[in-house]
Amino acid sequence: MRTLIVSLAALSAAIGTAQADTLGEAMTSAQESNPTLAAQRQRLRATREALPQALSAALPQISLSASANAADRDFEDPLTPDDGRTETWSSSANISQLLFGSGRVLASTRAARAQIAGATADYEGARQSLLLDVTTAYANVRQAQAVVTARETTVANLQRLLEYAQAQFDAGVVTRTDVAQAQARYAQARTQLVQAQGAMAASVEAYRRLVGRPPSDLQVPPAATGLPMDLDNALSTAVDNNPTLISAQADTRLADANVASAAAQGRLNVTAEAGFSQGADFDDDLSESSNDTVGVRLSVPLFQGGLIRSRTRQQRALRSASNLDLAATQRSVQEVVTNAWTGLASARSAVQSAREQVEAAELAYEGVRLEQETGLRSTVEVLDQEADLLTARLALAQAERDLVVAERQMLAAVGTLDIPAGSGGLIEDNDQLRGR
C-alpha cells in the first residue's frame, strides 16, 4: 500500500511540475497527431477522387497500341519451299469522344459531389467528436486532480483530529470510542485517497491516448464562446452546421443521382470515334499499309432481361429510404440539441450551488472545530462535518467538470465546436479538405 501511494503521488507531482497546458493546445495536438482522425482524413482524400473519375467519362479517350509478331509455318511436302516464316508489325491510335450520354455523366458527377459532401461532413463530425473527447478527458484530469487534492486535505485534517482525540484520551477527557471513530475515518480517508489517485492515473492515460502526450499542469479552461443565445437559435444553427444532418442530406442527393444514373443506362449513347492503324512486314518495305477511320457510334439497349428497370426500381427504393433516414436524423438532432441546451443550463446552476455549498461547509467545519476545542462538540460531530466538507468539494469538482463539457457538447450538437482562436491547428485549411 505504501509503495502504491508513493508511486501515485509521484505521478501527481510530475503532472503538476511540467509545463502548463491549455485546452486549446490539447485540442491542437490531438487534431494534428490523433491516428483515428488521420485515418478519416485519408478516407476523405480518397473520396474526393470520385469527382475526377466521374468527369473522365466526358473527356476524350485516347489509346495507342503496337505489336510485333513472328509466325513460322512448316510444310510436310518436301517439294514445297520452306518460306513459311513471316515477321510483321502493326500500330494503331484510337480516340473517342462521348457526344450524348442521356444524362449518365451528369448523374455520375452529381453522385460524386454528393459523396464528397457526405465524406466531408463525416470527417467534420469525427473531428468535432475528437475535440469533444479531448475536452472531456481534459476536464476529467482536472476533476481527478481536484478530487485528489480534496482527499489529501481530508486525510491531513483527519490525521490532526486523530492526534487531538488521542491527546484528549490520554488526558482522560474523551473515551476510547472517540479515538476509534477518528482512527476509522482516517483509515477510510487514506483508502479513498489511493482510489482517487488510481482514478487520476486512468484519466491521465485516457488523455494521453487522445492527445498523444501526458497532461502538464492543465489550466482552467476558459468559458466557451459562440454558444447560442436560446434554444430556437441553437436549433436553427444545427440545421446549417450539424455534420450528421449535413451527411444525411448528402445521402439523399446521392440516392437521387443514383436513380438518374440507373435510368440512363437504358437510354441512347452517342460516341464519335476516330482511328489510325499501320502495319507491314519486317522483310518487305513495300508491304506497309495504313488505314484511317472516322465515325459515329450509336448504341441503345433494347432488351436486357429487365435488369435496367430492376436497378432503377432498386435505386428509387433506396432514395425513399434515404429520405426517411433524413427525417429520422432531423428528429435525432433536435433531441440532441434540446438535451444539450438543458444540460448546459443545469450545469451552470450546479456550479453556482456547489460553490455556495463549499463556502458554507468550510465555515461550518471551522466553527465545529473551534466548538470542539471548548467542549461544545463531540469528536463524531467534527468527523461528520469534515465528511460534509469533503462531499461539497467533490460536488464542486464534478460541477466544474460538467460545465466545461456541457458547453462543448452544446457547440458539438449545433456543429460549431472548433479549436479556440490562437491555438493553431489549421490542417483542414492547408489540406483543402472541405470538398470540391
Image: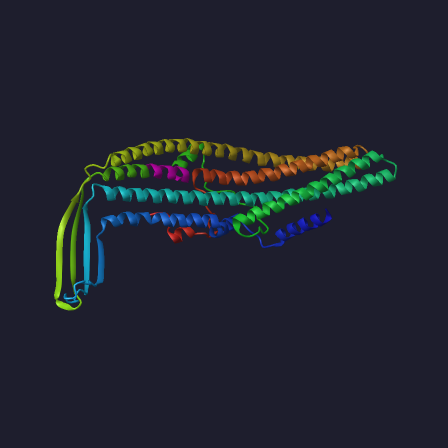
- Dominant secondary structure, magenta: helix
| Front position in the image: 261 or 142 | 261
Residue at the image position 16 percent from the left and 44 percent from the top: 298
Q: Is residue 374 visible?
A: no
Relative to 200, 424 lies left or right: left
Q: Is residue 320 visible?
A: yes
| Front position in the image: 135 or 213 | 213
Instruction: Locate residue 116, reporting x and y percent.
Output: 35, 45
| Front position in the image: 391 or 371 | 391
Q: Is residue 376 above or below residue 66?
A: above
Relative to 261, 384 lies left or right: right
Image label count: 0
Instruction: Locate residue 381, reporting x and y percent.
Output: 76, 32
Residue at the image position 80 percent from the left and 42 percent from the top: 163
Relative to 431, 17 lies left or right: right
| Front position in the image: 223 or 43 | 43
Taking the magenta stretch, the answer to whether it contains residue 245 is yes
Taking the magenta stretch, the answer to whether it contains residue 379 is no
Instruction: Locate residue 180, reporting x and y percent.
Output: 80, 36
Instruction: Locate residue 374, reporting x and y percent.
Output: 81, 35
Residue at the image position 65 percent from the left and 45 percent from the top: 197
Q: Is residue 345 above or below residue 112?
A: above
Residue at the image position 58 percent from the left and 34 percent from the top: 350
Q: Which residues are magenta?
A: 240-252
Q: Which quarter of the picture shows residue 199?
A: top right
